[in-house]
Image (spheres, rainbow, N blue to C red):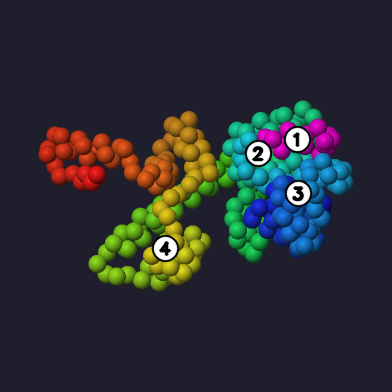
Amino acid sequence: MQIGFVGLGKMGSNMVQRLIKDGHDTIGFDLSKENVDAIIQKGSRGAYDLKELIKMLDAPKKIWLMVPAGEVVKKVIATITPLLSPGDIVIDGGNTYYKESIISYNELKKSGIDFLDAGTSGGIWGLKEGYCIMVGGEKKIFDVCEPLFKSLAPPDGYRYIGPAGSGHYVKMIHNGIEYGMMQSYAEGFELMNASDYNLNLDDIADLWDHGSVVRSWLLELLYDALKKDGKLSDFKGYVADSGEGRWTVLDGIEKGIPVYVIADSLFARFRSRQDESFGAKILAALRNEFGGHAVEKIRK
C-alpha cells in the first residue's frame, strides 16, 4: 500500500522502515533535509516539501502524520487540506488530544476527506518489536488502511476502537496509566536505594521481571538503565510531560472519577522541575513560626 509519511523523527523514521520491510510504497517528508535523505537511504522515496509529497501520491491519497501534537498537527492539516481531494485519507498517529482529533475529523469531513486518529505506543523500540496501535474513526476507512496497521504492529497489536477521537482517547488513558506505573517503580527503587542493605538494584529489576506480579516492559527498560549505571549518574531528576497525563486527570475531573495515582504521578513530575519549591519554603517557615522547629537557612 502507498503511504505519505509526514514526520521522520526517531519514531516516524522507524515506522517508515517497518513499512518498507513489509513491502509498502512509502514517501517520507520532514522539515529536516537530513532526515529525508536518511529515509531515502533506507529504501523509501522522499519529498522535500508538503506540496511535493502530495503530488507524488496516487489517488486516493493516504497521509500519516507523525508530528508533535497541538499547533504543529493543526498547521500541517491546514496546509495539506487544500491540496487533497474527496476520498483522500489523513491519519494522525501522534499524541493529539482526543477532542482536537474530533474537530479535525469534522473539519476534514466538510471537504470529503477522511480522518483516522491512531494512538501509537512503542517508542524507539517499535522498529524491532512493533507498535501497539489504537484507531478511531469510521470503520470502513480503518478497513481500507488496515494493511498499514498490520505491518506496523506485532501480532494482535492493533485494534479498531470506535468513532472519531476514540483512538487518541484510549492512548491518552494508556499514557496516564504509564505515568502511575513509572512513579510506583521510582518510589520503590528509591526506597531500596536508601536501605541499609547495599542492594544490587539492577539484579532486583531483572529478578522481578521473571515471574513476579510486577513484571513489565517498563521493568525490563529499568533493568537496562540500571545495568549501565546503577546510580544513574548521567541523569538529572527532571521529568517532562507531553500532555497525556494532564488530559487524563482532566478527564477524571470532568467525569467525577478519582484518579489518585495518575494525578500524584503528574504532580511528582511538576515537582521534579523545580530547583527549589517556594511551597516547601512556606512549610519550613510556618513550622518555625508556630513551633520554633529547626530550619535550614541559605548562607549568604
Tag 3: residue type?
Phe
- The residue to which callout 2 is attached is 72
Tell me which numbered mark, 1 or 3, is placed earlier along the sequence. Answer: 3
- The residue to which callout 4 is attached is 232
Locate residue 161: give its quadrant: top right
Tell me which numbered mark, 3 or 2, is placed earlier along the sequence. Answer: 3
Q: Position of residue 158 (x, y in %)?
A: 65, 52
Determine the CA span between mark 3 and mark 2: 14 Å
* Left or right of 141 in this view: 118: left
Viewer-closest of 64 and 119: 64
Tell me which numbered mark, 3 or 4, is placed earlier along the sequence. Answer: 3
Residue 160 in view, yes or no: no
Asked if the residue under mark 4 is in contact with the one under mark 2, i.e. CB atoms within 8 Å, the reply is no
Mark 1 burial class by Cα count in 10 Å: few <14, some 14-19, many 20+ = few
Tell me which numbered mark, 1 or 2, is placed earlier along the sequence. Answer: 2
Tag 2: residue type?
Val
Tell me which numbered mark, 1 or 4, is placed earlier along the sequence. Answer: 1
Mark 4 burial class by Cα count in 10 Å: few <14, some 14-19, many 20+ = few
Tag 4: residue type?
Leu
Residue 241 in view, yes or no: yes
The span picked out in magenta is 72-88
Asked if the residue under mark 4 is in contact with the one under mark 1, i.e. CB atoms within 8 Å, the reply is no
Q: Which mark is residue 29?
A: 3
The magenta stretch spans residue 75: yes
SS for dot 3: strand
* Left or right of 208 in this view: 175: right
Locate residue 34: give its quadrant: bottom right
Residue at the (62%, 50%) spot, across then down: 120
Determine the CA span between mark 1 and mark 2: 11 Å
Viewer-closest of 124 and 282: 282
Mark 3 burial class by Cα count in 10 Å: few <14, some 14-19, many 20+ = many
Tag 1: residue type?
Thr
